[in-house]
Image (tube, rainbow, N blue to C red):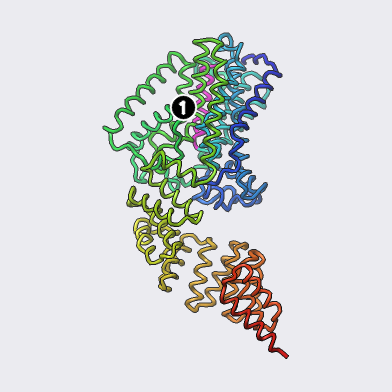
Amino acid sequence: MVAPPSSNPARTALALAVLVGATLAAYLNSFSGAFVFDDQSAILENTSIRQLWPPGSLLSPPIAAGVRGRPLANLSFACNYAAGGLDVRGYHVGNLLIHTLAVLALFGVIRRTLLLPALRERFGRDASLLALSAAGLWALDPVATNVVDYLSQRVEALMGLCYLATLYGFIRSTQSASRWWPVATVTACALGMASKEVMVTAPVMTLLFDRTFVAGSIRAAWRQRGRLHLALAATWLVLTTCMLDARLADRGVGYALGVSSFDYALTECRAVLIYLRLALWPHPLVFDYGWDFVGGIAAAAPWAVALGLLLATAALALRRRPMLGFLGAWFFVILSPSSSVVPIIQQPTAENRMYLPLVAMIALLVIGLYRIFGRRTLLAWPVVAVALGVATWQRNFDYRTDVALWTDTIAKRPENARAHNNLGGALLRDHRVPEAIVQFESALRLKSAYPEADNNLGAALIQSGRPADALAPLAAALRLKPDFADAHYNLGQAQFQTGALPAAIASFERALELQPHQAMTHNNLGVALLAAGRVADAIAHDQAAVQLDPGFATAHYNLGNAFAQAGHSAEAMAQFETALGLDPDFVEAHNNLGSMLVNAGRMPEAIAHFEAALRVRPDYMQARRNLAAARQRTAAAP
């Protein structure tokens, strides 16, 4: 057992306070940042987070959510939802809290490592300052904004926290006779396995840490702490269980998905060197690199040779200078699950993967320069930390809206078709339809076989009042992706608006076959069925819509119309009243309820609803005519 390091509680507490304060200051302007990109599926459309109990749904979120097989992350989102619904600020606070805890864990890992017998003589005097410098630089490095500001990357932040907590717990277990530290170490490792698949490397790196800094050899580490290392390896069973449920292929991860392992490996040679460059100079930061695969051996050769030399150097250092080699292993081993031969076709390059590997680069820089130049290097790091903090503060502004984020991405990667498509989607949500159409068309020029962009272009053309023009891109989307539920839905809208009623009904029905729990699709199918005279069927789908989404005012309104056409006046009026309770300015509901009240002889109430509709929309001629008729009948009454 290694003797515990001597400590100065006051100095340690001050260092921790500085880290917390600096991290909070750098991200103070991030709390109002928007939900962007995968946040839509991971949070906004993730119905499994809407309740904490019973926990069954938390373990089986929608496949598209990106947290399937990552139950700890999904649970954390559910806790956010329970505390504040979909208030984006709560999710940002959650991400920042996790990052801050990871920073504190890193401080503890570095400080206690430098105070181990193998390093104490060289670094023990300034262990706390070195740990403060390294942890502070990591906390403030703008590379981390892709994890802290991008809410769905909480999976990476949680995994990073659990990874560092595992290592910290292991170090403490070598210094204490308490059984709780081994238990805490294995627990942290298991929780990490339930956060993200990269945690698979944690038992390996913990054993390597033991060999490098504590035991001196793998054999000695196994002899002294074999049971603990076995227990850590046993947490792979947690990961295996999670991955069996993860449906990785649906997330674009795995083989036979259109990209070979060899081509992916060639691309990752370039990606890893991009990560190294960003570790040394974090600019420019790119939110999404798109589907930029290296085209063949010749194009990848410079990257492959450079990476091969780095890997050989790290392997040699691990053998001859183990402490230096450990940092190289940390960088390459942690990157290996995502940057090797298992294709991740949607994101061959992603800055969030640098979150933990960045630790090795910063530690090498801080401790290496201290080793060469001595204590005077400690004076430089606060200046560097301030510069990084300012860069992080500025980067946070790019996340304030999805329009700002995708505009920044296109400025840096104009050839990224996905960025153009997603900027178009953001503009469409902001009702900037002509600008959105331009972006969708740009995406299709860059990538002709792009069903998502075809679908979005069709949706934008429908919103611009050009449903006939929308038919062609929507048909193209379905030729490329026949089971594309959104495209079937949008095609149904275009067909309905161009008068092709039977075709519209068929499209909506197909969309529901693919996604049966979409309230909007049930609602629009109900409208089409009512127009086709199939009143009973319309009522059934409208009822399904309001059951799926009780707060859907338009669905209640359409159900009221269906009930009215079926002659169920009381039920119709009840639905119109529900719609108005949800949306008091719903002018069509005021008008239709007013008309039913006229038929029921309740003139004062009818007049009140017609007047309410006209206060919201003075040019609503149908309500104006109905109001005039109601007043005339009232005046003519005996």
Residue 286: in sight, yes or no?
yes
Residue 118: in sight, yes or no?
no
Looking at the rendering, the stretch of residues picked out in magenta corresponds to 197-213
Question: In the image, is residue 39 above or below residue 101?
Answer: below
Three-letter amino acid code at disc 1?
A: Ala
Identify the residue shown where x is 50% and y is 64%.
521
**Residue 58 part of the magenta segment:** no
At label 1, counting other C-alpha atoms closer than 10 Å, the crowd grade (few under 14, some 14-19, many 20 or more) is many
Residue furthest to the front in view is 618
Identify the residue shown where x is 67% and y is 27%.
180
Question: In the image, is residue 324 above or below residue 409?
Answer: above
Count the numbered circles shown. 1
Name the chief secondary structure element in magenta.
Answer: helix
Closest to the observer, 17 or 83:
17
Residue 341: x and y in percent read 38, 35
Residue 98, picture quadrant: top right
Dot 1 corresponds to which residue?
279
